[in-house]
């Protein structure tokens, strides 16, 4: 079973930067949209960023201007570059890939921002 594998999470001080990466563990054809979501304790999972195969990106206002999503279509990898992190960004970050047949989710990677 092919899975999405995230990496790059960890502990960072407020104002710092972190880059998350996500790649499938095997072959995954027909990916249209890739994205990142996050979930803090006691809250619902929320959108962080998405990117289409054509490079069109989408961000909510809470991260726009601070986070940048990028993608390598040849490798089916997606990255999330996070700047000016604040404690409010603390959450488990999940990678997502939408294909023609189904949606894949990663296991999540913890990002903790200390004040």
Image (cartoon, rainbow, N blue to C red):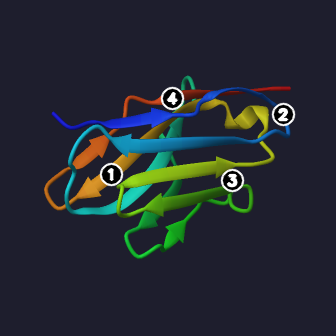
Of the residues under marks 3 and 2, which one precedes in the sequence?
2
Secondary element type, mark 3: loop
83 relative position to 104: left or right: right
Q: Earlier in the sequence, mark 2 or mark 4?
A: 2
Give coordinates of residue 40: x percent, y percent. Answer: 57, 29
Quadrant assignment, res 89:
top right
Q: CA distance from mark 3 to mark 4?
A: 20 Å
Q: Where does the N terminus fall, quadrant-wise? A: top left
Residue placed under numbered mark 2 in the picture:
14
Q: Mark 3 to mark 2: distance in Å? A: 16 Å
Q: Which residue is mark 3?
A: 62
Residue 27: which numbered mark, if any?
Answer: none
Q: Nearer the viewer, mark 3 or mark 2?
A: 2
The answer to which of marks 1 and 3 sits earlier in the sequence is 3
Label 1 vs label 3, nearer the camera: 1
62 to 106, vertically: above or below: below
Counting labels gives 4
Could you say where residue 27 lies in the image, as x and y percent from the top left? 20, 48
Mark 1 vs 2, N-terminal side: 2
Q: Relative to 11, is 93 above or below?
A: below
In-front residue for pair 3/42: 3
Q: Residues within 10 Å of mark 4 (few under 14, many from 20)?
A: many
Calculate the distance from the C-alpha at mark 1 to the C-alpha at mark 3: 22 Å
Residue extending farthest front: 74
Asked whether the residues under the numbered discs 1 and 4 touch, taking CB atoms below 8 Å apart as contact, a structural biologist would say no
Q: How far is the residue under mark 1 from the one under mark 4?
A: 16 Å
């Amino acid at each position: 079973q092919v899975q999405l594998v995230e990496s790059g999470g960890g502990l960072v001080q407020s104002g710092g930067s972190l880059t998350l990466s996500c790649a499938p563990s095997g072959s995954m054809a027909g990916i249209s949209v890739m994205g990142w979501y996050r979930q803090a304790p006691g809250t619902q999972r929320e959108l962080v960023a998405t990117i289409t195969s054509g490079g069109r990106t989408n961000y909510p206002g809470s991260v726009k201007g601070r986070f940048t999503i990028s993608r390598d279509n040849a490798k089916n990898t997606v990255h999330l570059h996070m700047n000016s992190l604040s404690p409010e960004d603390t959450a488990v970050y999940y990678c997502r890939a939408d294909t023609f047949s189904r949606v894949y989710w990663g296991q999540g990677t913890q990002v903790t921002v200390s004040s």
